[in-house]
Image: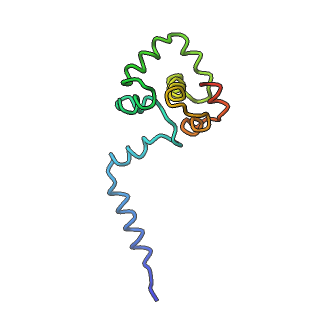
Amino acid sequence: MEVHNNTSENRQDASISESLSTEDQSVQCNLPQRGVLHVDSFAENDRIILYYTGFKNYKQFMLLYSVLGPCVNQLSVCCHLKSQDQLFMTLIKLHLAKDDFELSILFDISEKLVSFAG
């Protein structure tokens, strides 16, 4: 019969936790919650912006956003999404022909809000 020493296992777990660097912990803390997409998180990744929107980079996306002028205030009708993210979602819907169900998962909102906002 094998006897386990829980005290030594607890010390090992504590040692492992303490060995995590501050950088590792900050990376873990900065992960988006519940898989919600935010255009700002891709500002430095031109490939992702191109894939999702068809724009070459984040700067072009922001140019469109700024050209919309006061109209962007009308985008803020959707629950917890910023107007930039609503535009991002609309461009994904148009560029990739994503359906409302998939977008509701990606942006963590209801299908009804996706159809209303996009």
Q: Position of residue 112 (x, y in %)?
A: 67, 31
> Residue farthest to the right?
112
Q: Position of residue 111 (x, y in %)?
A: 65, 34
Residue in the picture at 38% in, 28% down: 43
Q: Nearer the viewer, residue 67 or 92?
A: 92
Vertical comparison of 91 with 29: above or below: above
Q: Position of residue 118 (x, y in %)?
A: 59, 25
Q: Position of residue 61 (x, y in %)?
A: 42, 21
Q: Nearer the viewer, residue 116 or 21?
A: 116
Residue 17 placement, left or right of 38: left
- Colour option used: rainbow
Vertical comparison of 1 with 79: above or below: below
Residue 99 placement, left or right of 43: right
Instruction: Report the number of discs.
Output: 0
> Residue farthest to the bottom?
1
Residue in the picture at 52% in, 37% down: 36
Vertical comparison of 13 with 43: above or below: below
Residue 110 placement, left or right of 20: right
Residue in the picture at 47% in, 17% down: 65
Vertical comparison of 96 with 10: above or below: above
Q: Nearer the viewer, residue 10 or 60?
A: 60
Residue in the picture at 53% in, 28% down: 89
